[in-house]
Amino acid sequence: MAEKVGYKAVTKFLIASPTKVRPVAHVVNRKPCSEAAAILANMPQKGARLINKTLKSAVANALNANSKLDEDMLYIREIKIDEGPRLKRIWYRARGRADQLLKRMCHITVVVDEKAGK
């Protein structure tokens, strides 16, 4: 029998470095959705806003897919921060030289599921 997947939301091509977004994701992983949303709303990092937006989308997907679900019974089952493509830009330097500036992107995947037991 296949394992239940849960309800998922994916946000792609966000201009934020995955190495900066991952520590924010580790703070809220495996927490109830209402608690995670409160934590993310009070964090100053840009990654917190991006994860919160994806989390709200995953909760909305869960509630629309199953009308019997209660929002208070949902928790974050998994958060993945994957690397996206990099935008390569020129950074002009002194003496006619140039460096390469990489604008990194990330893909955020949030999977929510219902708490077992109640």
Image (tube, helix red, strand yellow):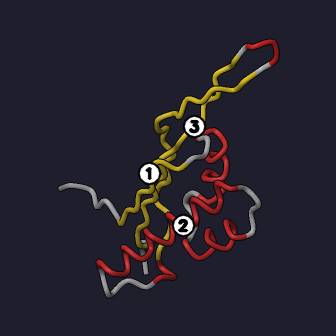
Q: Quadrant of the N terminus?
A: bottom left
Counting residues from the N terminus, which is met first, the one under dot 1 or under dot 3?
1
Q: What's the distance in space between the residues labelled 2 and 3, CA to CA? A: 19 Å
Give 26 or 87, whichever is nearer the viewer: 87
Give 78 or 14, whichever is nearer the viewer: 14
Counting residues from the N terminus, which is met first, the one under dot 2 or under dot 1?
1
Label 1, on which residue?
Answer: 12
On the image, the x and y values in percent for residue 7 come to: 36, 66
Classify mark 1: helix, strand or loop.
strand
Depicted 15 relative to depicted 3: above or below: above
| Residue 104: mark in rendering | 3
The residue mark sitting in front, 2 or 3, is 3
Q: Quadrant of residue 50?
A: bottom right
Which amino acid type corresponds to the residue marked 1 in the rendered image? Lys
Q: Residue at x 33, y 87 (%)?
A: 68
Label 2, on which residue?
Answer: 53
Which amino acid type corresponds to the residue marked 3 in the rendered image? Arg
Q: Residue at x 62, y 60 (%)?
A: 28
Counting residues from the N terminus, which is met first, the one under dot 2 or under dot 3?
2
Q: Quadrant of the C terminus?
A: bottom left
